[in-house]
Image (cartoon, grey):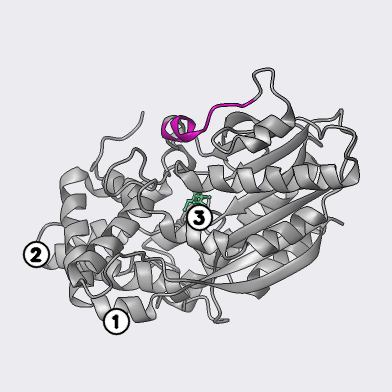
Amino acid sequence: MAPNKGDNVVVSNMKLERMLSMKGGKGEASYANNSQAQALHAKSMLHLLEETLDGVQLNSAEIPFVVADLGCSCGNNTIYIVDVIIKHMIKRYEALDHHHPPPEFSAFFSDLPSNDFNTLFQLLPPLANDGGSMEECLAADTHRSYFAAGVPGSFYKRLFPAKSIDVFYSAFSLHWLSQVPECVLDKRSAAYNKGRVFIHGANEITAKAYKKQFQMDLAGFLTSRSKEMKRGGSMFLVCLGRTSLDPTDQGGAGLLFGTHFQDAWDDLIQEGLISSEKRDNFNIPVYAPSLQDFKEVVEAVGSFSINKLEIFKGGSPLVVNQPDDQAEVGRALANSCRSVAGVLVDAHLGDQLSEELFSRIESRATSQAKELLEKLQFFHIVASLSFA
Ligand SMILES: C[S@@+](CC[C@H](N)C(=O)[O-])C[C@H]1O[C@@H](n2cnc3c(N)ncnc32)[C@H](O)[C@@H]1O
């Protein structure tokens, strides 16, 4: 039976894949309204995505070309990117043979079952194939030139039939672990993350447990994709990364979840609103890998060759209209944190205490606005992989 919100359960140890999602809907703290930074970071990497697409094998035009976005979430970013991918592939087909139409395209939008697919589907432009040609589809920018479907499930397991996908894309998702390692929440374990809600600044044993979980998860991801990808297909992956070799220094993710977010939990304890045990039972299931952490797994799985694997400076996760307006910066940080971690916090604390927590984050971030804008920078691991 699903627990009630705020029940005294260790949320992070439950089957995360049944509950993790970004904040759905179109409200102030929704992912749809707080993912402009991801959009900007993705746009700054388009040249790398296009390089990957240039390496994809073109098949006969009778065979549909299939794209899958894994961890699509519920905002416009996924729709924008799928459109870029398909338009690029159409151009490649046209350059090959002007006399024959390109194949039909289909796109799978995949995420965990708790994702707000309804909001996503409502954002999809209508299909432009009512008897029209592909040229007409392309000319009509307000329409889509591909068939669309949603696929619920964890990308750490199989999602598609064997040899069915030409291009896999996944952005800002693979740093979400399939679970918080059990030892991290176990009082008797040396990896128990006492006093913290994230591994930034934690002890080495705790960080090792997170690293192990990340590497096991990534191996599951790659093994599943190796079965599902068509011969000649490619994959473009972007996830949060870190420049430091030390996993207890989580870089931008560390600043986001290890400072104001962490301090706000401590505020609730000091104000007598929650026990320290309640805080210690919560950990954010995020791990920002180093390039080496990532590379080790790709090499160990062995199914893919590396076209490109690099760390890319994405920039700030905060998009504000008036950088001098401290209140706007504080609100942006709280909303951005809430849009990605709010669902987990709501489930652990209940709506009312969760509200208290995010208002503490907002006021802390407001008073540190200038520093936040200067220091909060995200780096991403970018991987372009093809069948070995
Ligand atoms: C920050 S959002 C990224 C959304 C989108 N790709 C973008 O570029 O804006 C991360 C997404 O990863 C999804 N996710 C996390 N773990 C997942 C898993 N194991 N399987 C599938 N999706 C997962 C989350 O539900 C969430 O929608």
What residue would you read off at disc 3?
Answer: 176
* Category of crowding for the residue at label 1, using alpha-carbon neighbours closer than 10 angstroms: few (below 14), some (14–19), many (at least 20): few
Extent of the magenta region:
119-128
In front: label 3 or label 2: 3
Q: Secondary structure at mark 2?
A: loop
Q: Residue furthest left?
A: 271
Q: Within 8 Å of ligand 1, the CB of disc 2? A: no
Residue 126: say if magenta.
yes
Residue 279: say if magenta.
no
Q: Determine the residue positioned at 20% across, 71% down.
A: 325
Q: Nearer the viewer, residue 13 or 18?
A: 18
Q: Which mark is residue 271?
A: 2
Q: Determine the residue positioned at 68% across, 47% down.
A: 85
Residue 213 picture quarter: bottom right
Q: Nearer the viewer, residue 96 or 386?
A: 96
Q: Determine the residue positioned at 31% across, 54% down.
A: 338
Relative placement, left or right, of 188 versus 270 is: right
First along the sequence among labels 2 and 1: 2
* Category of crowding for the residue at label 3, using alpha-carbon neighbours closer than 10 angstroms: few (below 14), some (14–19), many (at least 20): some
Amino acid type indicated by mark 3: Trp
* Category of crowding for the residue at label 2, using alpha-carbon neighbours closer than 10 angstroms: few (below 14), some (14–19), many (at least 20): few
Q: Determine the residue positioned at 33% across, 59% down.
A: 337
Q: Position of residue 42 (x, y in %)?
A: 55, 59
